[in-house]
Image: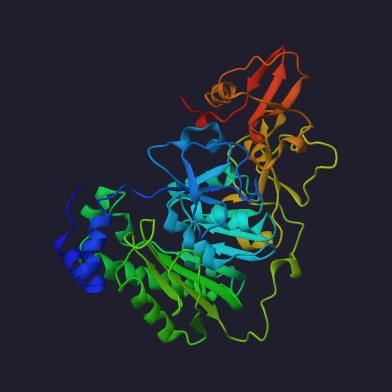
Amino acid sequence: MNPLPPAYISQMKRLLGEAGFFAYQNALEQPVARALRVNLLLCPDGTPPCPIDGLGGPVPWAGGAYFVEGDARPGLSPLHEGGLFYLQEPSALAPVSALDPQPGERVLDLCAAPGGKSTQIAALMGGQGLLVCNEPVPSRAQVLSRNLERMGVQNAVVTCALPGQLTSRFPAFFDRILVDAPCSGEGMFRRQAEARDEWNENSPRGCADRQLDILEEASRMLVPGGTLVYSTCTFNDTENEGVLRRFLDIHDEFTLVPFALPGLPRADCGYVHLYPHEIRGEGHFVSLLQNHSGASSAPECAAQRPLGRANKPARGQCSRGTKDAPLSLPDVLAPGVHFPRLRASGGCLWAWPDGLDPELLTGLRVLRTGLLLAHAEGRRAEPDHALAMALRPKQAARSVSLTYEQALSYQAGETLELGDLPAGYTLLCHEGVSLGWGKQANGQMKNHYPKGLRRR
């Protein structure tokens, strides 16, 4: 492992004292802390339906999260690709727990890629309300969108925009906002050797100016009485307390709110530092702010607000098919299962999320608008992989349970021999977890697992 930069050593000794620094330095020589978060959309009680390789004790500060022990590699399981769990650094679970999103609210994750915190928010919202997930870097926005799809999230919009582009469209709109800001990454020094090489003593100041700009834009999108979490994965006071001081100096309508999460130090001043020598995690800074301007009572949630105009098509992007192709959903749903607010756009059929006027997305780059139900392939419509990931086996008209070996073969793109089954699209599952579509024809289950997701 590369040595710590001398300027960084001086900084940490100033923050922690000599004894604290040596405890911190010793922690960096220990194995990296790992965790996984069971998808509460699939398992509301946080208990996985089957054994998961390396699953250890619970992470106290996040529902459904568990430490991963030893050299286990649960990400190799077909259930990982099926969205049963998300691998996540333990301390990175704390910001969303502090945000405490509720079903029916409007929530913004402003710096959302790769999607760990967005999918954690979505799970706590239980599919109710509106979640907007933004990432300004296009390649990272694609990863974010794929992770939301993998975890079966139905009520999220994914945008690829600078914060200011959203502010003009969503003034005083969101009940809760997460700003997990890009930072100098000091909490990555144990996991990523290159993070040490990229750090220099000027990094914090440059990051802090950008963080303040992002926080300023976020503040304008929060409703009076709303909650905002500002977090980083770095330790210096320039990017943490310093940014908060600068922000609060110009925003007297905001105050820091004390909070406490199980298993973590209390945030009596409204913020907390999480260090790898004090908790089982890589490190984070988490602060909780509230906008008190004009708030005489709890903020109105999204379920209580009008939806806006409902006669406009969705603007979610879809590269498949043509706009003239059929867009009716194939017969793949069990009786009684339906999706409201259907909208067609660009060869795609979407289940549009609640609480959003489509006009607000005009001119934005949008990767996902709710749940993609079907896409056009030539002159026919096919059920989309996103729909498969959002369905439970009993919600499909036809489903088949695969063995572990069959599940791996399916995710590798192979055709399956599953015996005499009814013809048509079939939801393929493993251990009660949906993996994707197959189509039974001529005694074979044709593979419809997306080519870009196939595993060797």
Residue 66: % across, % down? 50, 49
Quarter of the image for residue 26 reads bottom left
In the displayed structure, 269 sits above or below 406; it is below
Q: Nearer the viewer, residue 37 or 169?
A: 37
Residue 237 vs residue 5: left or right? right
Front residue of this view, candidates 289 and 27:
27
Residue 73, horizontal then vertical, whole percent:
43, 36
Tell me if residue 68 comes above or below residue 95 in the rendering.
above
The mark total stands at 0
In this image, 423 relative to 106: left or right?
A: right
In front: 335, or 134? 335
Residue at 50% across, 82% down: 254
User: Position of 271 compared to 343: left or right?
Assistant: left
Pinpoint residue 107: horizontal percent, then vertical percent: 60, 64
Between 289 and 68, the residue placed more toward the observer is 68
Dividing the picture into quadrants, the one containing residue 395 is top right
Visible in this render: residue 135? yes
